Amino acid sequence: MGSYSYMALGEEIDRDAYVVCKYRVTTDLPMEKAAEAIAAEQSTGTWTGISTLNDEVFRNYAAKVTAIDGDMVTIAFPEADFSIKVGAVPQILSVISGNLYGLSALKGVRLEDVEFPKGILKQYKGPKFGDAGLREILHRPEKPLVGTIVKPKIGLSPKDTAKYIYEAGSGGLTNGKDDETLVDQAFCPIEDRTKAVAEALDRLREEGHYMVHAINISTNGQDVRELAEDAQKWGASQLMIDVLTCGYGAIQAVAEDPKIKVPIHVHRTMHAAMTKDPTNGISMRVIAKLVRMCGGDALHIGTLGVGKMEGAITEGKQNQLACQSDDVPYKKVMPVCSGGMYPGIVPAVIKAAGTNNLQIQAGGGVAGHPEGVRAGAMAMCQAVDSAFEGVDIEKYAETHHELKLALDRWGTK
């Protein structure tokens, strides 16, 4: 039984031959020993020396600790450690984010980032529509997209849901979506809801306004493609999948289904169980990269440091970059800022984003307007217009009644 070192500090590696991960590590051990424990556990090692590990296996399949910078550890996994079959995100995660969390050598470990070689990237097709495709559908080439979540989360009938969407669209919104908790409950069956919403969207289109609404099809793995096809047949203009409860394979199965001709809106519900602790779990940036690989067209990325789902601006920007970077061979994902959005917060969100290429999504910030859903939608659109035109929002509100009422109620950020 030989003894093998997984340390390769400073060693130059071929980025096209490895999956490179960065981990934030908390430990009482020397960082080198903690890093080596991760590399060993996730590749060829175990808790003791074993007779079945030989030089050839170690050379070809062992992970390498290539850098340690404070509490940040970089580990490179040979591409050969990963499945050669398309759709292997579950297997990828079992390597880069698997048993390491249970290692006694670690108090905490967080997967902060991952870079994939070309050989793995080419196995995935990425978004079918992406941000540009969404803009084309909505006839909105420049301004941020402005959306809503039907509120209350649950309890509305198909007829009331459709009425909400019609009012929101009449107020100028480009996007609507089901809540992540709504799929096919008895009070709002998915077939009836989809058909009713489709009729509302058709009516808006006849009136000269383009809008899409994401129908939540989050369900069991063996059923998601069939439900996606059914929802599209019933008139869905966009589909929504809760990625962490359904799995990345659900996105990929729907995105790569040639029968599906509408975009996929990806919700990240449950993400904070993995992303909230800065010392343990998985960063949202990693989730965003995997969603893009699998074919999501729009993805919730947080509120860029503002709103009820607060997170650091720098982390939000990293999530945004994962959706929009040019370093992967895929279309760009539309970043969705959602969670406590309201008109007065819009300038801060757009300033933090540093771009107009995002979707701002408000639920209570639309439905909670003193004059109702249509006025709430108008106020959100007016807030976006003021930011897009570079006009101070309070000055803009002087000539826009709906925005003025919203600022009086909720203020500005």
Image: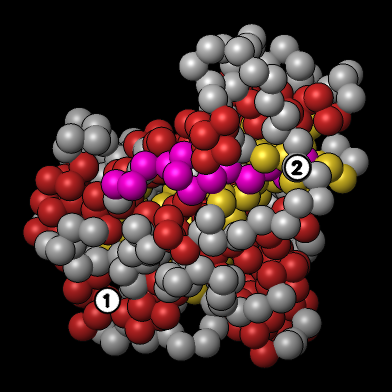
Q: Which range of residues does the magenta coloring cover?
A: 73-85
Tell which of 9 and 106 is nearer to you.
9
Residue 260 vertical position relative to residue 114 in the rendered view, above or below: below
- Left or right of residue 319: residue 51: left
Which quarter of the figure has residue 101? top right
Tell which of 304 and 397 is nearer to you.
304
Q: Amino acid at mark 2?
A: Ala
**Percent x, y of residue 107:** 78, 19
| Residue at 33%, 64% in the rendered image | 125
- Left or right of residue 91: residue 314: right
- Left or right of residue 59: residue 239: left
Number of residue marks: 2
**Percent x, y of residue 143:** 54, 83
The residue that disc 2 covers is 8
* Secondary structure of the residue carrying numbered label 2: loop
Q: Which mark is residue 204?
A: 1
Task: Check disc 1: other Cα within 10 Å, few if <14, some if 14-19, many if 20+.
Answer: some
Q: Is residue 6 visible?
A: yes
The C terminus lies in quadrant: bottom right
**Percent x, y of residue 378:** 51, 73
| Residue at 69%, 70% in the rendered image | 353
Residue 74 vertical position relative to residue 207 in the rendered view, above or below: above
Residue 55 vertical position relative to residue 330 in the rendered view, above or below: above
The N terminus lies in quadrant: top right
**Percent x, y of residue 149:** 44, 53
Q: Is residue 75 magenta?
A: yes
Which quarter of the figure has residue 164? bottom left
* Secondary structure of the residue carrying numbered label 1: helix
Q: Amino acid at mark 1?
A: Leu
Task: Check disc 2: other Cα within 10 Å, few if <14, some if 14-19, many if 20+.
Answer: some
